[in-house]
Image: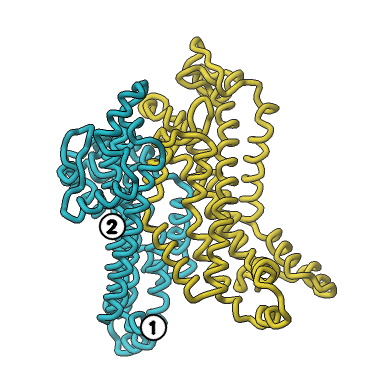
Amino acid sequence: MLIYLLKRLLMTILVIAVTSVIAFLLVHLSGDPAAAMAGEGASPADIASVRETFGFDRPIVFQYLEWVGRILSGELGRSYYLRMDVSDILADHLPVTATLGVMALSFALLLSIPLGVAAALRPNTVIDRVALWLAVAGQALPSFLFALGLMYLFGVYLRVLPISGGTTWAHFIMPSVALGYYATPAIMRLTRSGMMDVLQSDHVRTARAYGLSSWRVVIRHGLRHAIVPVVSLAAVQLGFMLGGSIIIESIFSLKGIGYLAWESIQRADIEVIQAILLVIATAYAVLTLLADLLNAALDPRIRIS
Amino acid sequence: MTNIEQTTAPSVALSPGRMTLHRALRHVSFWVGGTIVLAIILAAILAPAITSHDPAIQDLAQRYIPPVWTEKGSWDHVLGTDNLGRDYFARLLYGARISLLIGFMTVLISGAIGTALGVCAGYFGGWADMIINFVITIRLTLPVVLVALVVVALVGSSLTLLVMVIGLLLWDRFAIVVRSATQQLAHREYITSAAAIGSSTWRILFKEILPNITGPLIVVASIELAHAVLLEASLSFLGLGVQPPQVSWGLMVAEAKSQLLFRPWMIAVPGAALVLLIFAINLVGDAIRDVTTPEGKA
C-alpha cells in the first residue's frame, strides 16, 4: 500500500507540475499579455512600458521559474486590475464555489443513488426506463439552457427562488441543481450496475436466506459494497464541477471562482487567470488521487498490480 | 421475429460490414436520430433556398416581431424577429451551419489525435503506453471550458481558432477508447501472424487494427460530435465563441438572455434546436453501439 501511495503521490505532483507549465504557457503565448493588459487603442509606447513594468520582456523560462518560485513560497501574484493579492481574491471567491460544489454534489447523490438502486432492484421496469431517460435527456440539454429553464420556471413564472446573486442559501438552490444534474447520469449508471452485481452475489443470497428483511439486505449488504466505486466517482465529478461552474456562476451571478475567471478573462487579468487554472487543475488532481487511494484501500487487487 | 428476411438471408454469406449495416437499418433509434440529423444538415445547406431573408440584415423598424403562432405574428417572419429586426427563422437556419461545421471539423481533429495516441499506446504498450497515459491524465486535469475561454479571449475569437481549440481539447475519450480496443486486438492471432510474415508496423496499425476498431471509433465520434456542438454553444453563450455577424445557436440564446422575462420563446427556439440536434446525434451513436457490440448481434 505504501509503495502504491508513494507512486500515486509522485504521479500527482508530476501532473500538477506539467499542468502549471501548460497554464503558464497558455496565458503567455496566446497573444501579447502586455498588449491585452494595456487595452484596446494603447500606443506602442504604452504597451512597451507595461511589458517592462510586469517583466514580460524577459525570457519566458525565467518568467515561469519566477512564477513557480513565488507560488512555492505561498505568493500567488497580484491582480493588476483589482490591485489586490491574488490569494486574497481567491480566498474571497472560494467559499462560494465550494458551497456550490458541495451542494451540487449532494443534489446529484440524493437523486442518482436512490434512482440507481431502484433501477437495479427492478430492472427493465418503468423506474429503470425513467432513470435511463433522465440520463439521456441530461446528455442532450446544455447546462446553460437548463439553468435558464430553471430560472424561468422558479424565478419568473412561480417566483419562489431568487435568480441572481449568492447572499442566502436559497440563492444556491437553482445553481446547485443546474450544476449537479450533469453528474447524475454517470453516478446513477455506476450505482445501478454495482447494485446489480452485488445483489447476485453469494453473501446477499445468504443474507436473504437467513430471512433478513429485504431493506436490510439492500442497504447493509448491497449498497454498502456497491457504494465504494460511487464515492470515488463522486470525487472526480466534484473536480469536473469546479471546472464547469464558470457557466452556471456567470448565469446566476454567483461570485465564485468561475465568475472570477470569467471577469478576469474579459479584463485580461493574467495573474488571476493563471492562478485559477492552477487551483482548479490541482483540485482535480488531488480529488482523483483521493478517489484512487480510496479505491485501493478498499480493493486490494488495485494496489498489488 | 420469424419473417421471410431471416429465412432467406443466411443462404448468401454477408460480410460483417454488410451485416452491421443490415442491423443498423432495422434499429428504430438509428432511423429516428439519423432522419433528424440529416434534416438539420439539409436545412443548413439549403438555408438560402428555404428562406429569402438574410440572417445578418438589420431592420430597426421591424424589431421584436412575435412569431406566427401569436396574434401579431405574420408568415413573413415565421419565428418573428430579434432585437435588431433580423429574421429569427433565417438566423436559426444559418446558425445550424456554424454548429454543424464546428462540430464535424473538431471531431476530425480530435479523432485524428485521439486515435493516433490510442493506437500507439494500445499496440506498443510499455513506455509508449505510460507516456500517452500521462498525456491523457494531463488533458483530463485541464478544465475544458476554462482553457477554451482563456485561449479564445486572449487570441481573439475566429472560426478557425474555435475549431482548433475545441479539437485540441476533446480527444481524450478517443484516446482512452481506442487504446483499450487496440489492447484487446494486439495479441490476436491475425495480428501476430501479420507481424510474423513481415508486415511493417504501419501496415499492421492501418490495415489490421484500424479497420477492426471502427465500431467503437464511430460511437466515440458521435459522442464527441455532440460534445463539440455543446461546447461551441457554451462558449458562444458566454460571448467568447462565434462572433457577430456570424450566427450560432449558442449566440442566439446569449443575445436573447435578457428577454427571458418578456419573450421566452426567443431562448426556447434556438435552445430546442440545440437539444434536438444533440439528442439525435446521441440516438444515432447509441444505435451504432447496439449494432456493433457483440451483445447487440443476437
Q: Which comes sooner in the sequence, label 1 or label 2?
A: 2
Q: Is residue B78 left or right of residue B155?
A: right
- A59 lies above or below B207: above
Image colour assigned to chain A: cyan
The crowd level at tag 1 (other Cα within 10 Å; few <14, some 14-19, many 20+) is few
Pick the residue in front: A63 or A194: A63
Pick the residue in front: A211 or B166: B166
Point 48% across, 59% down: residue = B172
Q: How is the image coloured?
A: by chain
Image colour assigned to chain B: yellow
Q: Quadrant of residue B197?
A: bottom right
Residue A305: give its label.
1
Chain of the residue under the numbered disc 2 shown in the image: A
Residue B73: horizontal and vertical position, in percent? 53, 19
Q: Quadrant of residue A285?
A: bottom left
Q: Is residue B154 left or right of residue B165?
A: left
Pick the residue in front: B285 or A77: A77
Residue A282: give its label.
2
Marks 1 and 2, Cα distance to the nearest angstrom? 26 Å
Residue A140: horizontal and vertical position, in percent? 48, 49
Q: Quadrant of residue B46?
A: top right
